Image (cartoon, rainbow, N blue to C red):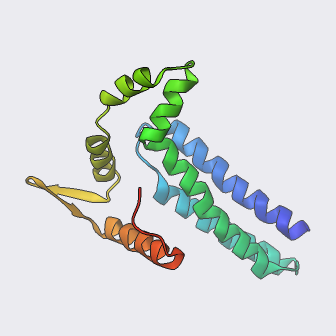
């Protein structure tokens, strides 16, 4: 049990440091790479402590920690992106709305252009003249999504 608590503690420390970094940084872009560096650094320290103190379940702790990283990243990235579903929730959160009010509010949004700009800003796309191309990291993400869909037996969706 102490191993699991220590694992969650180190992960929580990485998240808190990342949140602090996001708050104090003047740049308002996604900070996935800094979080990955923080998480990796904490993981190395965690493994060192677990092995040094001869605590049980070191491999289990590492697996739990590694699985927590993408779980956090999913929620972190989703706070930065605007989607139709998120916009609908924000509209209705302001008060009960009729379908026509929601439709009018969504008509003002250009989700495709917004998403292209976000992907370009985050380094997943590059624009060359009037065409968009995947960057190396964008290709890696696209490949990973394709692999997930293949493994899950799901068709392409959004």
Left or right of 28 on screen, residue 89: right
Q: How many marks?
A: 0
Which residue is at a point 70% across and 68% down the rendered structure image? 65
Q: Seen in the image, is 64 located left or right of residue 101? A: right
In the picture, measured across the screen, residue 156 lies left or right of residue 125, that is right
Q: Residue at point 50% right, 47% down?
A: 78
Instruction: Please state the horizontal and vertical placement of residue 48, each as a whole percent of the image.
Output: 74, 76
* Residue closest to the eye, 96 or 20: 96
Q: Residue furthest left?
A: 129
The picture quadrant where one finds residue 11 is bottom right
Residue 12 in view of the camera = yes
Q: Determine the residue positioned at 17% across, 55% down.
A: 127
Measured from the top left, where is residue 27 in percent x and y? 40, 40
Q: Is residue 19 above or below residue 139?
A: above
Q: Nearer the viewer, residue 31 or 116?
A: 116
Q: Is residue 86 left or right of residue 20?
A: left
Task: Say which quadrant the N terminus sits in.
Answer: bottom right
Give the vertical position of 48 relative to 111 (above or below).
below
Residue 110 percent coordinates (x, y): 28, 36
Seen as rendered, the residue at the extreme front is 99
Q: Nearer the viewer, residue 101 or 151?
A: 101
Q: Quadrant of the C terminus?
A: bottom left
Residue 60 x/y as whole percent? 78, 77
Q: Does the image show residue 82? A: no
């Amino acid at each position: 049990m102490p191993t699991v608590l220590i694992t969650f503690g180190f992960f929580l420390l990485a998240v808190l440091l990342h949140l602090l970094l996001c708050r104090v940084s003047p740049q308002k872009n996604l900070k996935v790479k800094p979080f990955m560096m923080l998480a990796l650094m904490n993981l190395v320290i965690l493994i060192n402590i677990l092995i040094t103190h001869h605590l049980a379940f070191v491999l289990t702790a590492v697996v739990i920690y590694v699985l927590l990283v993408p779980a956090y990243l999913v929620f972190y990235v989703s706070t930065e992106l605007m989607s139709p579903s998120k916009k609908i929730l924000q509209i209705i959160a302001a008060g009960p709305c009729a379908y026509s009010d929601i439709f009018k509010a969504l008509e003002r949004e250009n989700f495709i252009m917004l998403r292209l700009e976000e992907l370009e800003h985050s380094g997943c796309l590059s624009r060359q003249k009037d065409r968009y191309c995947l960057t190396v990291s964008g290709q890696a993400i696209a490949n990973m999504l394709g692999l997930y869909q293949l493994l899950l037996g799901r068709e392409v969706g959004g």
